[in-house]
Amino acid sequence: MTKISLCYFNVVFLQHIICLIFLKFNVIYFWENILENIKANRDFLLSKIEQAHKNSFYCNFKVPKLVAVSKKQDNYKIDKAIECGQKFFGENRVQEASLRWQERIKTYKGLELRLIGPLQSNKVKQSLKLFDVIETIDREKIAVEIAKHFHEDSKTKRFYIQINTGNEPQKSGLDPLQADLFIKYCINDLNLPIVGLMCIPPQNEEQSVHFVLLKKIASRNNLHELSMGMSNDYQDAIKFGATSVRIGSLFFGKRQI
């Protein structure tokens, strides 16, 4: 090899080394930045939740839980959220949640996984083994199917009934006028541990009206848990008695389409 060739080889080799070092530091910066953003987002949300709670009529009760909506989020973001201390997560689809969480719930202790999306009859048995809380009982067929498979060894220990406070045909949830009878049916006839209610208000209406309605239904049925409020309205929900809020974009940032 000539001196010129050797010199050229050394220059190219050095360039590769520099590129590898640059890439390594970029990867480190990327991960640290993701961690910092999620931690900052979580700290900000917890601060806002605590402040809204402190200024509410319900300030003597427990501070509402921050449920991070992890549906369609990248796996590395979920891992970073757990590393930051996040314990409560919400998923919309049973199959997706199973793939995402089966191993994580074995690895990380103290996590609480909630189903916040529609539940199909053929997914009930799987859901009872995966979720700690199911928030979306919305019809008799699902309630009966859950009661059929629910037992003391089920992972799920608490259930919410989803109320369609705006009576929107495209949304799941029970008609508010049917809520009282259905709640009693689930508790007294099916012996299900119903602890609360959940709602997703219409986007084009005043959210507080729907939060008040959900709170009234819960109060007259002696239910103490209210899952209401998302990224755009969680502070208002807390003012009206939310015990948990479901936050996606403000926690993780934009998700996959």
Image: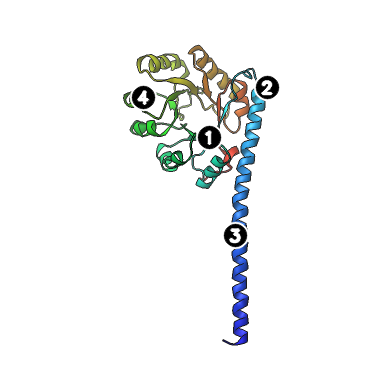
Q: Would residue 27 be seen by someone viewing this image from the given angle?
A: yes
Of labels 2 and 4, the one closer to you: 4
Q: Can you identify the residue that label 4 sits on? A: 152
For image coordinates 61% across by 77% down, the residue present is 10
Q: Quadrant of the N terminus?
A: bottom right
In depth, the one of 214 and 50 nearer the eye is: 50
**Given the current orientation, which residue lies at the most extreme left position?**
148
Q: Earlier in the sequence, mark 4 or mark 3?
A: 3
Question: Three-letter amino acid code at disc 1?
Answer: Lys
The colour mode here is rainbow
Residue at the spot x=60%, y=22% of the render? 208
Local crowd size for mark 2, using a 10 Å CA cut-off: few (<14), some (14–19), many (≥20): few
Q: Which residue is mark 2?
A: 55
Q: Amino acid at mark 4?
A: Glu
First reached walking from the N terminus: tag 1 or tag 3: 3
Which residue type carries mark 3?
Answer: Lys
Give the percent coordinates (x, y) of residue 41: 63, 39
Vertical position of residue 101 compared to residue 160: above or below: below
Frontmost residue, 156 versus 184: 156
Crowding at label 3, few (<14), some or many (≥20) Cα neighbours within 10 Å?
few
Element at label 2: loop
Which of label 2 and label 1 is nearer to you?
Answer: 1
Which mark sits nearer the N-terminus, 2 or 4? 2
| Residue 60 in picture, x, y percent from top left | 62, 18
Dot 1, how many residues are within 10 Å of its Cα: few (below 14), some (14-19), or many (20+)? some
CA–CA distance between discs 2 and 1? 25 Å
- Spatial CA distance of label 4 from label 3 is 50 Å
The residue type indicated by label 2 comes to: Asn
Checking the image for residue 24, the label placed there is 3
Label at residue 87: 1
Give the residue drawn at x 37%, y 17%: 191
